[in-house]
Structures are given as C-alpha cells and as structure tokens.
Amino acid sequence: MMAARGLDALLLSTEAEVRYFTGYLTQFWQSPTRPWFVVVPKSSKPIAVIPKIGAACMGRTWVDDIRTWASPDMVDDGVSLLAETLREVASKDGKIGLPMGHETHLRMPLADYDRLRGMLGGLNFIDATAIVRNLRMVKSEAEISKIAHVCQMVSNAFDQAPRVFNVGQSETDIFRAFKTECLGQGVDDVSYLVGGAGAGGYGDIISPPSARVVEKGDVLILDTGCTFDGYFCDFDRNFAFGDVTDFARRAYDAVYRATEAGFGAARPGATCADLFLAMQRVMNDAGALGSEVGRSGHGLGMQLTEWPSLTVQDKTVLKTGMVITLEPGMTFAPGKVMVHEENIVIRDDGAELLSRRAQQELPVIG
Amino acid sequence: MMAARGLDALLLSTEAEVRYFTGYLTQFWQSPTRPWFVVVPKSSKPIAVIPKIGAACMGRTWVDDIRTWASPDMVDDGVSLLAETLREVASKDGKIGLPMGHETHLRMPLADYDRLRGMLGGLNFIDATAIVRNLRMVKSEAEISKIAHVCQMVSNAFDQAPRVFNVGQSETDIFRAFKTECLGQGVDDVSYLVGGAGAGGYGDIISPPSARVVEKGDVLILDTGCTFDGYFCDFDRNFAFGDVTDFARRAYDAVYRATEAGFGAARPGATCADLFLAMQRVMNDAGALGSEVGRSGHGLGMQLTEWPSLTVQDKTVLKTGMVITLEPGMTFAPGKVMVHEENIVIRDDGAELLSRRAQQELPVIG
C-alpha cells in the first residue's frame, strides 16, 4: 500500500497507531507531556523515536531500532531526532504518509509539526489514513480472540446484574459495583463506563453517573468498554427496576429486533450502509422519533470505536475478520432513548457474536 | 490575557481544554471518531460546537450556546459549523488563539484543520498555549479539594497493601487487587496504574503488569492516577517482599530525602528548576547513576500530568494554588530504578501535602 502511493515512510504519533505497529502497550499515554513517534520505512522494520522513559518498555517489543531523547525538553522535544530519522529513510523530495483523515489526529504540538516540516524542506507530508484504516479494520485471529475474551468476561459481569444492582442505590454506587464486578471477572481495566437511569427511560448515553438514587419504574443503561491486553469490548445492557412501562418494553423490543436485522445483514460484501438501513427500517416501523447517536454501530479493537461507521454515508464493504458493534438506538418518547449494542466479527459465511446475546425482553430487577 | 494578545477568540479541542472552559465531563472522549470544539469569544460566554450526541450532557453545564451537528459526518464533520461560529465572533482579519505549544495537540483531523483555515481566509491562527497554561496551572480551592479527596482515598488504599499484596501473586493479580481496593475506597476510576516488581528492584515504571509471580526479595512499585469528579491524584508507593537488599533500602532513603528537600524548597517564588536541583543534589550525593524519567515532578489536575515540569530548564515560578507532584527518581544499580512521589499544593507560606506521606523506610511485606 505504501508503494502504491509512492511513500518513503509512514509517520505515526497516537497510542493506537504506535501500538499497532510496535506492540508497545502502556497507560503512560495518559500523560500528555511527551510526544511519541514511530516511523515505518518502506522497506525495513519500524523505528521508534521516543522519550527515554519508554526505552525499557519498548525494548520488550519486536522493534530493534529504538531512538530516544531526554524528554520533556522545552527546547527540542524530539523534533530534530525525528527529522534526522525521516531524512535517513526518505529521499530528498520524498513523501511521508501521515494520518490526516477522519477519526485521526496528530499527537504532537502543532508548533513542533511546523518546525519539523521546516527542517525537512523538500519532503512532502501526505494523508495516509487509508493505509492505516485498511490495515486496522481487518483483525487477525489473535486480535479477535482478545476481543472475544473481554466480551465474555463482561457478559459474565452483566449476568450478575440482578445480584449487584438494586433500587435505592445511587447511579454512582451502581457504576462502582459494576466496575468491581468486571475486574473480578478478569478484565484489565474498565476504561469506559457511561449511561444512567431515568423514570421510564434514560435521556442520554454518554454521561457519568449522578448521585440520583434509582427508583422503581426506572430504566437503566450501562454501556461499557473494558479492555483485555489492550483490546476493547463495547456493548451495553438495559435493565428495568420494578414496574416497566409498555413504552419502554416496546422500545427495547424494537432495538432488539433491529440488532437481529443488522446481524442478519452482516456478511462479507455487505456495506456499512446496508447494515444501517436494515436496522433503521425496524426502528422506523416501530415508530422511532429519530436518534442522537449519529450511527448504528462502528469498528472495535484497540480503541473503543474505530472505523468504519454504520451510517448511510459509509459505503465500506465488510470483509472477513472485521470486528464491529451493532448499536441501534432510537428516541421513543420526548427525551427518552433506547440503545442496544452487541459485538460481532464478520466470518466467511456471516456474522458471529462476540458478546453473549442480550435477553429478548427488557430484564426487570426486583 | 486574550485582550493583551489581541485575540478575538480561543479555539479548544481536547478533553481537558473543553472541560476546563465548560465543565463538560464524560468518558466519551475514549472514542476518537468525533471532534469536539469550544470557542471562547473575547467578550462573551463559551460556545460549544459539538456532535449532537453530546447535547444533553453539555446542556447540564453552564454553557448556553450549544451548536450541534449530526456526527460522524464523512463529508463535513463539524468544519463548516465551526467556521461559521468563528466568523461570527471574529473580525475578518482577526486572530484566533489555539494551543500549539508544549504538552498540547489539536484533536481534529489535520485535513479538516486545513479546510477550516481555507474557509476562514483572512483569519490568523496563533499559539495560545500560554493563556491556557497560565489559567490551568493555578487551581481553585474547589479543584484542590477534589485532588486532595482522591489523594486521601488512594492513601487509604495503599495502607491496605500488607493485607492485599502477597508473595505468590502475579503482578496482574496485584494490580487487579489494588484497583478493586481503590474503587472500594471511593475513587471514580483507576485511570492509570503502572509499575512492576523485580528482584532487588524494578527496571521501569511505565509498564503494564506482567504474569510474573512476585517472590521474596522483590521490590514492587505501583504508580497510580485515580480520579474523583474528573481530577487526578498521581503518586506511587514502593514495597519490598521478605528480605530486602541494603542497596534498595538506601535508594529508598535517598528518594525519600530528596522528596523532603523538594517539599522544603516548594513555596511561592521558587522556580521549578529550584525544586529539581534541591532533589537532584540529594540523589547525586547518594550516588545516583542518572534517571530515565526526564524530570522530578510535574503539575497535576484534570490530567495525570500537566504543566509545569520540574526540570533544570523549566523556570516557571511557583504560585499559591499550584498543585504539583514531587517525583524524584534515580537509577541506583544497572537496570534498577527507585522512584518516589507525593502530591502537594503550594500555599502562601510553603507546601502542603495532599497525599499522605509515605513511610520513611521501605515498607516490607511478609
């Protein structure tokens, strides 16, 4: 792919990009202080250009060529070392591929990027999103097995809901109990847990927990991305407490059936738009008032969400080995939302569930 | 500060920047798919330019002007809405401030940033790192109390070490036990936990846990950033198992005393370099063989690490209300490191500990 675009090298700077090409796994990315770089030359192994603090950890990956500087350096935080490395692997007027497209960003100060380009006069930086995207979208069996493993552990944790969630707990209590349950089931981290509860339904699905106490008649959603060895699951579950309105039951039924439709449509050769439309049809027929989410699923792997997106715009053709979420969501009453989510892998003959299928009817606790 | 630089508006795009100016707190930033923007005009309240999925959550902040688009949009993911907003608040040849300096990055696709600049012909984008840095470095009492609270909860968790850590556990077991303990103490998330154990000392401090079983004679470090209401602690603790070498004891004593020296030097008017040198002197006298960390502490708040850095280069003058870590670290034998860390706030008359002071001698378990 690099040859087809005439690239001398790729330049990568984000956690997922660096890890994908090197295996370098650390939570140290939480610190925004230091930039990290990987250069992938057209005809040799990746070169790590990183702060010295990462040398030991990078030394345990398959990368041989590890170049370090003492970071943080307020005067030159790796820029000249990176420039030197790029000069070494690129011809004078060569092309360096850098992800510049949708879902990407450059994790280095803009002023340093300008300096880098200044130092590398003749070199051209061009968009290489398609290369990274096409590689990362199709998972290896090793990747799939990690995602499947964390999906199973989190499915086990959700099975404990009737035991660990109760009327009278605050949302904060419920979130903490679920995080502890997930760790107990063996996940490495509960990196993402959002949701909330509301009388007869919840209003949005990206909020942190509130101090509000869960009452009879509430519907709760928990949407979680837990990790195992650097790979995410991303699915949600809904629970009702005590009485549940017919509105909420019917909305749950609609998103459940939408997920079935998405699952049925998921096979090599189908497009993301096909899956989106299959799910949307079910929800429209059920009287959906729209959706705030903007899509009905997405890729999944080293990040909680990855390319592609299940939208009408995204014509990405599904291939064997792609791991995606099916995430139909709909507004079923003013300010009331119902979202459902499962994780699947595309196999030669169709889709395979990685999460354990949710219950067919809205589960009721208490 | 904006007036002094002739800025019409600030443009912000990262999690911490957006939250600092709006109060918008969500883990949804884990998803790289959608860009989020806040525009701070020179003479009115911040304007949120965000994906529709965030409208409800942003609606609970103090921001009134919330502009949304249906994201992800592969054709125009908020770029024209953002351009329109900036045109509205800036004069035709005005200046937009954007963080471009050390520890910052732009969280939007580079190609979209180019498009934005193209759409805004006459406008100039200039570096506004200093403004954001100067604001964020000095914490309010509300911010300090959140950091102090999470520091106390994690101090409580570390107090349980003799009960929850044992010879025979794997590093993975130890990490999981500690995460569960922190959640039990009341933290919202264990967002960062790194470290490891080794015979007579550990080799680096940013690795994830291995499957290696802890043995007698090991020294373990856990370095954690837990959060409470969006604010971090960041400190570590060392533990020995069974026998402990004099080498390790002496190294612990050196970094403990270095922390004392840093604490003694920390007051309004002192520079970051002063604190660095005060700590370095103690470690040099104790025979330090260098350090891979690159600094001896840093700012702390909404992010695990923030400006400033305790290095010889950083001449930032400490002010009342700054929250920093003291993190002296040294290589004390080939491949063996000892790092110590406490969290403090600068008060009018000196420093105040936020973490509970570590034991004066290397604690031994079993």
Image (spheres, coloured by chain):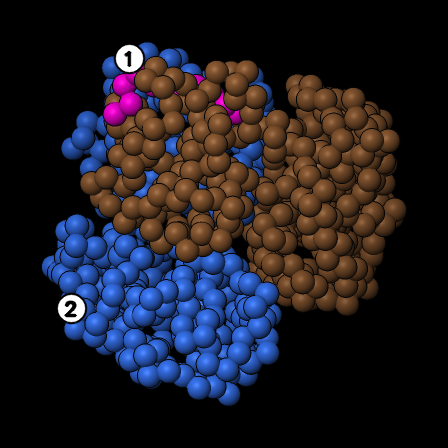
Chain colours: A brown, B blue
For the N terminus of chain A, the quadrant is: top right
- Residue A115 tag number: none
Residue B55: percent from left, percent from top = 55, 36
Tag 1 secondary structure? loop
Q: Identify the subunit bearing mark 2.
A: B
Taking B46 as reference, is B364 above or below it? below
- The residue under label 1 is B122
Circle 2 Cα neighbour tier, 10 Å, few/some/many (<14 / 14–19 / ≥20)? few
Left or right relative to B314: residue B252: right
Residue A262: percent from left, percent from top = 81, 31
The reply to whether residue A212 is visible in this rendering is no
Seen at 25% across and 52% down, the residue is B308
Residue B301: percent from left, percent from top = 36, 55
Seen at 83% across and 54% down, the residue is A363
Amino acid of disc 2: Arg
Closer to us: A300 or B42: A300
Residue A356: percent from left, percent from top = 81, 50
Seen at 30% across and 70% down, the residue is B332
Tag 2 secondary structure? helix
**Front of the two marks 1 and 2:** 2
| Residues drawn in magenta | A119-129
Residue A125 highlighted magenta (yes or no): yes
For the C terminus of chain A, the quadrant is: bottom right
Closer to us: B256 or B53: B256
Left or right relative to B120: residue A30: right
The reply to whether residue A180 is visible in this rendering is yes
- The residue under label 2 is B281
Circle 1 Cα neighbour tier, 10 Å, few/some/many (<14 / 14–19 / ≥20)? few
Q: Disc 1 or 2, which lies upstream in sequence?
A: 1
Q: What is the C-alpha distance between the residues marked 1 and 2?
A: 52 Å
Residue A316 highlighted magenta (yes or no): no
Left or right relative to A90: residue A323: right
